[in-house]
Every structure is written in C-alpha cells, then in structure tokens.
Image: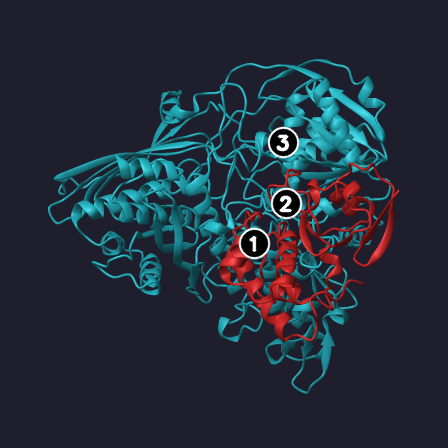
Chain colours: A red, B cyan
Amino acid sequence: MTTLKVNGRDHQIDAEPDTPLLYVLRDDLELNAAKFGCGLGQCGACTVIVDGKAVLSCVTPLVLLEGKQVTTLEGLGTVSAPAPIQRAFMEEQAAQCGYCIAGMMMRAQALLQRNSKPTDEQIRAELAPHLCRCGTHMRILRAVHRAARLMDTAELSPTQGSER
Amino acid sequence: MNAPIILDRRQMLAGSGALIVSFSLTGALAQDQGAPAPAPSPPGSLKTSPFLDSWIRIDADGSVTVFTGKAELGQGFKTAFQQIAAEELDVPFASLKVVTADTKLTANEGYTSGSHSMQDSGTAIQYAAAQAREILVAEAAKRLDLLAENLRTENGAVIAPDGRRLGYGDLVASDMLHVQAQAKSKLKDPATFKVMDQSVPRVDIPGKVTGGQAYIQDMRLPGMVHARVVRPPSYGAQLGECDSAVVEKMPGVVKVIRDGNFLAVVAEQEFQSIKAMKALSAAAKWQESARLPKQDDLANVLTSLLSQDSTIFEHSDASVTGTRTIEATYTRPYQSHGSIGPSCAVAQFSDGTMTVWTHTQGVYPDRQGIAEMLHMPPANVRCIHVEGSGCYGHNGADDAAADAALIARAMPGQPVRLQWMREQEHAWEPYGPAMVTKLKASLDDGGKIADWNFEVWSNTHSMRPGGAGSMLAAQHMAQPFAVPAPKPIPLPEGGGDRNAIPIYNFPNAHIVHHFIPAMPLRISAMRALGAYHNVFSIESFMDELAGLAGVDPVEFRLKHLDDPRGRDVIEKAAEGFGWQKDQRPPQDCGLGFAFARYKNLAAYCAIASEVEVNRETGRARLVRAVAAVDSGQVVNPDGLINQIEGAIVQSMSWTLYESVTFDDTRITSIDWQTYPILRFDAVPDRIDVHVINRPGKPFLGSGETGQGPAAASIANAIASATGKRLRNLPLTRKRIKDAIDA
C-alpha cells in the first residue's frame, strides 16, 4: 500500500511499486485527464503536477511518490467552476481533438504558479516537451497568455480548487 | 407508414430494444424499388438515407435529437450540426442533442473522410430539419385552422398571429417524420440566421479541459479487463515458438490468446497487461523476411514498380506553342498519421452479439469487416463511435477495433479494453503513401504557360476496411483473410491523382496517373490523400515557371486562373499578407504563396507565408502565414479557422520534418524520437485566416483544403530565401543546408 495525495485527498493505493503514476490515476482513481500518449516521456500527454512541478506521469513510478502532493486537471476546477487556465482554454477554443490538451494545461499551470507573467518565449520553451498533432499550437499559446491575465485579475488564486 | 420502426427505435434509444434496424437500408431498398420516373434526388446524404427520422427525432416532451452517421474526430462538426439543426428547426441550440455514428442508431454514411461531413451530413441535417419544420407548421395550421404562411416558428413552437403557441412536442405524432425527404426544402434566408454563421463555442471543449470522460480511452465498463497485443516485429513475420507458461502465471493475467500470428494477453489491470505483453513479446520467436525497399531510393523504387497508367486529362490547342521548357521531379516519402493517443477500442461479446466501441471513421464498414472476421452475421455486430485522439485519416483505429473484437470473443461476457502501445501505432498504422511526380511545362513568348505535362506515381490512398482483410487481426489469424486488391479511388475526387488535374487554364495539358498496385509498406488514407503532394508539386512548379517568366508568383497564378472564387481567395490572402510585387523579404527570410481548390470541387484555400532560414544550420521556420478560405456557406467561423490553422501547422510539420524510416526488414521510426514532428520551438509567430463567407451557397468540405497549399507555400518561401529549389519532401534542415552549400 502506498499513500498518495491526489487533488487534496489521501488515497491508499494497492499497486506494484513500479506502476507508473499514470495508471494509478487513470485506473485506480478513475481520473481521465492524464493521457497515455507514448509511455516514454516523449509527448507530454500524461503531465500532472507533483509538489508544484510538472511531471510526466507515464514514466514516474508510484514508489517515488509516497507523501507527495499530486494535482491533476480535475483538481483545478470544473465545468461550472473552471480554474483560470480552464476558462482560458475554453475562451480561446484551444483544442481540436483535445487529447494532448490536459497535459499542456498542467505544465502551463505549473509555469504560471511560479511565474505569473511569462513571456511568449518562456511559454514556448516550457511547452517544448509537449506534442500536439492537430496543430492547435497558436491557440494553446494564446490560452496560456490569457490564463496568465485571468490569474492576475481573477479573485481565484492559482492553487485554489483542489477539492471537487 | 411504417410506425413500428419508430417504436422500435425509441425502445432502442431507451436502451431496452434489441431489434437492429438500419434506416439507411430501408431507405436504400425503398430507392431500389423506387419510382419509375427519375425524381430529382434530395441533397447530401438524404440521397442514400431519405427518411427524415434517420436524421431528426422529436419526442412528445419537445426534446430534439439529431442523428449523423459521421464521426466527430476533433473537427468540431458535432457543434456545427447542432447549429444547423437549431437554425432550421427554430429550437434553442442548447436544447438539442446530437447522436453520432452508431450502426444501431444512425444512417450509414460510410466513412467520415474526404472533407465530406458538412456537405453530406450537414446538408442532410439542414434539409431534413427544414422539412421537419414545414411538417410541424402544416400540422399546426391544420389544428388551428389557419394558413401555414401566417404561422411562424420560434423556440421549439409554432406561433399563431394571435399569440397562440403549439410546442413541437404537442404537434409531433409517432410517425410524422417517417417520410421521405423531398427534393428541395425551403431553407432559411441566410440574412436571418441566428445560430448559423456564429462562432458558437464547441460543445465538447468544456469536458475536455476539465477531465471529463471524453474519449474511448476513458471508457470504463463494469468488470472490464485490459488487453494488449504483441504485434509481429515486421510485415509478414511468422510466429514460431512461444512459450507463454511464465506469462500466464504473472500477476493479474487472465488469458493469453494465440491465433496464428495474432498474439494477445488479457489482465485484470492495465499495467499488468503491459508487463505481461512485454514478457510475451520476449517469449515469442518470429521468423522475419527482408522485403522492404530501399528507403533512400524511393523515387526509383516507385517508378520501377508495375503500374496501371491512364491519361486522366488531355487538352490541346495547337495554335499555342511554348518556347522555353523546364522539367522537375518531386517526391514525397511515406508519412505517419502520428495520432497522439495510440489506438484503442472496447469490445464485449454477450448473448451472441459483439458490441465494439471504436474511434473508427466508418462504423458500418468496420461492422462488416469484424462480422466477416468473426464469421458472424453483421446484424449481430454493433459498432459505436466514441471519440479518440485525432486521426487525420486511416490510422490504427480500425485495427484496434478488430483486435478488441477478436480478444473479446475469447472472453464471453467481459468488456475488454485494448490499447496499442506507441511503437505499435508508429510501426503498424497504414501510412500516407510515398509519391513521385514529374512535371514539364513550357512558356510562350508572352510568359504564359503554353503546355503542361504532369505525371504522378502512387499507390491507392484507401485500404480502409469493408472486408476483414483490411484489418491486421484478420490478416494475422491462423485462418487469415487476404488483403483485398487495391483499387484507385475514382475521379473526380481521386486518390493518388487527387488534385492532379490543374485548376488553371493551360492551352495544352496532359495528365497521367500511374497507379501502382504493389504496396511495399502498409498504406491508406491520410488527410488530403494525393492532394498534399500533387498540390505541393503543382504550386512549387508554378513558382518555378513564374521565376522563368519573371512574373510575380501571385500575378502569375491570376494570369492563369478564371475561377472567380479562386481568384478571390488568392487576392484576399495576398492582401492580408501585404504581398507586393518586387517585395523584399526581411533578412534571412523568404516569402511564398500557393493556392488550390481541394479536389477541384471542395473548399478554396490560398496561403502566403514568410519563412526564415538559418543559412548556417539550414533550419527553416515558418514565421507567419496568412490564409484565405472559401468554404461556401459558413456554419461556425471559428471552427473553420481552427481547421485551417491546424492544417497549416500540421502540413508544416509534414513538410519540414517527417518521413517514415525503415531498413530492409523493419520499420525503424517507432516513436517521437525516431519520427520527430513539430515542437513548440518552431511554432509560427502568427497565423491569420480570412474567411470568405458565401451566404446560401452549398457547404464545401474544408478539413483538408489547407494541406497542399501550406506545403507549397512554405517550399516557395524557402526557395525565395535560399535561391535553391527543394523538390524532395520533407524539406529537412540537412537538405536545405546541402542545397545552400551546393
């Protein structure tokens, strides 16, 4: 048994210690946002936040996560009460198929939590590990800029909304 | 009237019915036995599924459901269809529900491909909704004893001049919409549109950005087990010894399945199935054969294969002769769809019925293929489309559906979720075919094109299912199904020859299609099919000729083009870009232009681009692009812009970076390291898309119209920046550097 704190809640996980976090999130906790894209850490679709940092959950084994705080896209907000980053992606219509988007949003969220006014160059550099095949890149960049503005002006703080 | 069908359908929608009714089949039969006098056929997919209730259902509570046989692939048409129905029916947008491709519920609209969704399904929904509204108004007129023309509709109700109001739910009777579509219904005047031609936000995005269950990969059924396949290491490899005893004892493993060369493992949990797959893969001994062609000599390989040659276009005017002639050969490698999410399917075999949830582009053809593979009647197989990761054509979706079905048959009652691994998707998906084009043209004394010769060598561009033999599982079984003989896709849409016939006016033109039946690599449909390479070739060569003539590339195109809508997009893109004759590009940059009308019958698209080239490294980056698109009547402007932006960015990635690699036996591009695609460091600064709306004109497919023009526009900009013409895709850093240094 491993104790894992996900989106503000403790969970007892009964899985082999080498199980990547991705499968714990998707299969044990039934969270949809983190996606299997490559299992190799090459595409970013599985990205979640662990202790404030963007982490590729497909190559991060459970054994390394005891006592750490994991945040997934579900932990940021909901359709009716979206977090600024979620609102920004909705307002910019920043998705086509959307399969890569949750991972992108989590890395952008981690960036904005430590740097509330990133430059365009910083955002591009930060998102370098992420692939999008539909070619939604222009909108994704716009959405991250918008999220930064929303976080700056909104009463919502970026870390709020870890309880659903 | 056939009232029982309606009742059955309602039961099915409630989840309690077992009868499978294919409405399209009823429709097709009705047509086959149809009227002796050829009546004008209704528009779009109403031709093949003419009953209105195949498209629109109104319940007694007034709720409206729209049915489409097309599959949402991330293009956003589910939202667009909802807009169309809301507009023509006069019901609130949010009150509508759209049901997509499902062999039990929706019309058979074949594949969701070729930019056909709006023109086939969107048109059917538009006309069906308009006729349904007419029927409801007529019913209200009867009940109120008023003339129909004195009534209006609003918010799901018919309103009388005195304010009396009859809701659609009150007006509808059980079989009211089970009528055949009329040839033409009166549509709304575009000037009065409230929902169409509006950038309504996509209905699926809120769920996708909050972690909702949005994809087939997110499906979880009670008692579901997880499966993985072990694919052969190469095409044609034969499985010999495979001792699975150790694998069967691994934690969670429920079953190992071997059927000839088909090998799979089922486990209780997903990661257990992955570990077991790896162990099983290590235990499997395969016999491989070296059968792949030389990757670095593809042009010669392709043009030396046996081909079926046909002249697809010929035009001659002996009075015009050329004086200066140039020729060139262009090539395209095999390229990968490269879906970010590997293919996935869920299947359940219960009570003699196989249900498959799949992200296929064609639920009916998949049903046929899976039924054939399992030797089951098609009526006992149901395929339901669930969104997957973007596919851009025929990726591993159909194969995964067949894999899941074959495994589920061995696990009666239990839902089986099967997902491919990254290397399986990259190594086994059917690629976009490699192509070769040879062009030769002459200019007359006035600097206009006098003659134009174009030859294209290509495989077919569709090996999609229908029969079982198109699916890997069926090919690998002990009693295998043969891969069906490839067929060229007929013109006017074409496959390898899609967009091979130029839209320009050339006094003399000769176009030859060399169709190559032999397929050294597994191939099928990839976004835009042959149009990507043909437009890349034509539009690159147009620039070469413009250079020879000493004429500005935009002016040169306009000199050869009569089509007024084509001229409009060219002029709009040039104007939006700030294109000027004798312009000087910024330092280290080049400017390029290209244009096409997709398939010569769908959307028009022109793209101007600015590309910077690092002369030291050869690295090219698209700095900015301006596109103009004419897609007929626009339904969702932002959705259309999203498609064109995506087309430009994706095509840029194909054009600058991508080729499938292989040695004499195996595919070697098996992940994102070995098949690199665009990353954020190369994303443009800016893309602008200008939409030319054509109110009241038919919808034109636009999902693929940008692929070819984007490629040629970038290639032309690289030529403008370097003074060197690159004709072999992809235009890699190394090729550009070599050209600069040459």
What percent of the width, then of the height, locates residue B727? 32, 37
Asked whether B561 or B669 is in front, the reply is B669
Distance of label 3 from label 2 (alpha carbons) = 30 Å
Picture disc at residue B657: none
Residue position marked by numbered label 3 in the rendering: B424
Question: Of discs 1 and 2, which sits in the foreground?
Answer: 1
Q: Chain of mark 1?
A: A
Crowding near the residue tagged with mark 3, few <14, some 14–19, many ≥20 C-alpha atoms within 10 Å = many
Q: Are marks 1 and 3 in contact (CB under 8 Å)?
A: no
Picture disc at residue B108: 2
Q: Amino acid at mark 3?
A: Gln
What percent of the width, then of the height, locates residue B393? 55, 41
Which residue is depicted at the point 70% across and 51% down?
A: A48
Picture disc at residue A126: 1
Q: Are marks 3 and 2 in contact (CB under 8 Å)?
A: no
Locate residue B697: give its quadrant: bottom left
Q: Chain of mark 2?
A: B
Question: Could you tell me which quadrant the C terminus of chain B lies in?
Answer: top left
Locate residue B563: give its quadrant: bottom left
Instruction: Give the tally of numbered discs.
Output: 3
Q: Amino acid at mark 2?
A: Asn
Asked whether B256 or B671 is in front, the reply is B671
Question: Of discs 3 and 2, which sits in the foreground?
Answer: 3
Distance of label 1 from label 3 (alpha carbons) = 29 Å
Q: Amino acid at mark 1?
A: Glu
From this view, report whether residue B140 is shown above or below residue B124.
Answer: below
Asked whether B177 or B237 is in front, the reply is B237
Which residue is depicted at the point 43% across and 25% down?
A: B295
Does residue B377 appear anywhere in the picture?
Answer: no
Q: Chain of mark 3?
A: B
